[in-house]
Amino acid sequence: MTGFSLRDATAADAPAIARIYGHYVRTTSFTFEEAEPSAAEMVDRMGRIIAAGMPYLEAQKEGVAGYVYAAPFHTRSAYRFTVENSVYVAPELARQGIGTALMQGLIAGCAARGCRQMIARIGDAQNIASLALHRRLGFVPAGQLTSVGFKFGRWLDVMEMQLALCPDAA
């Protein structure tokens, strides 16, 4: 990891995080969100993640270069040891190891919190970069949801991948 650092994200980072995420909302089918959330909405979302005791990290490289967080996988109590991850990197800084470093920090943080499983729901089965990132980090395919999203005039699949966060969870 060179040229950038990781730290906990704060509300002050929300405008930059909203800008990064907004790019993906506007230009890709990697997220099924169709309207860009405001910085204020991102503060609210971040607050809910942090209040749930989950990590929300960002990479710094002359500003926010990317971010990652884990959210509870489901609201039912039996799922309390399973989380779902989200990771986004500023498009101009892609392929510099930022996403990998963010995910490694997230995985370590979730494992330290006692989480046992991490789920990745990768919007658009054509999101080759995200699929490759998750595979490199040890995620394995867990399923495919066919034609569950509709964006930019086409039906989209979701790929599900899973990572055991502790040796006895596999």
Image: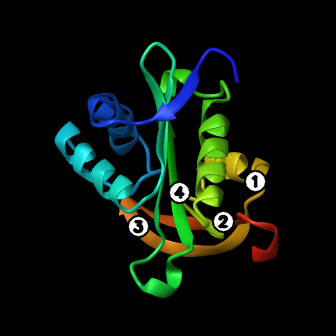
Q: Is residue 20 left or right of residue 12?
A: right
Q: Is residue 98 left or right of residue 153?
A: right
Q: Earlier in the sequence, mark 1 or mark 2?
A: 1
Residues under labels 2 and 3: Cα distance? Answer: 17 Å
| Amino acid at the residue labelled 4 | Asn
Residue 154 picture location, percent across and down:
42, 60
Residues under labels 3 and 4: Cα distance? Answer: 19 Å
Circles 3 and 4: CB atoms closer than 8 Å: no
| Amino acid at the residue labelled 3 | Gly
According to the image, label 2 marks what residue?
A: 161
Residues under labels 1 and 2: Cα distance? Answer: 8 Å
- Residue at 64% x, 69% y: name it: 117
Choose mark 3 or mark 4, whichever is in front: 4
Helix, strand or loop at label 1? It is: helix
Residue 170, relative to residue 106: is it above or below?
Answer: below
Helix, strand or loop at label 3? It is: strand
Q: Quadrant of the C terminus?
A: bottom right
Q: Which mark is residue 85?
A: 4
Q: Which mark is residue 149?
A: 3
Residues under labels 1 and 3: Cα distance? Answer: 23 Å
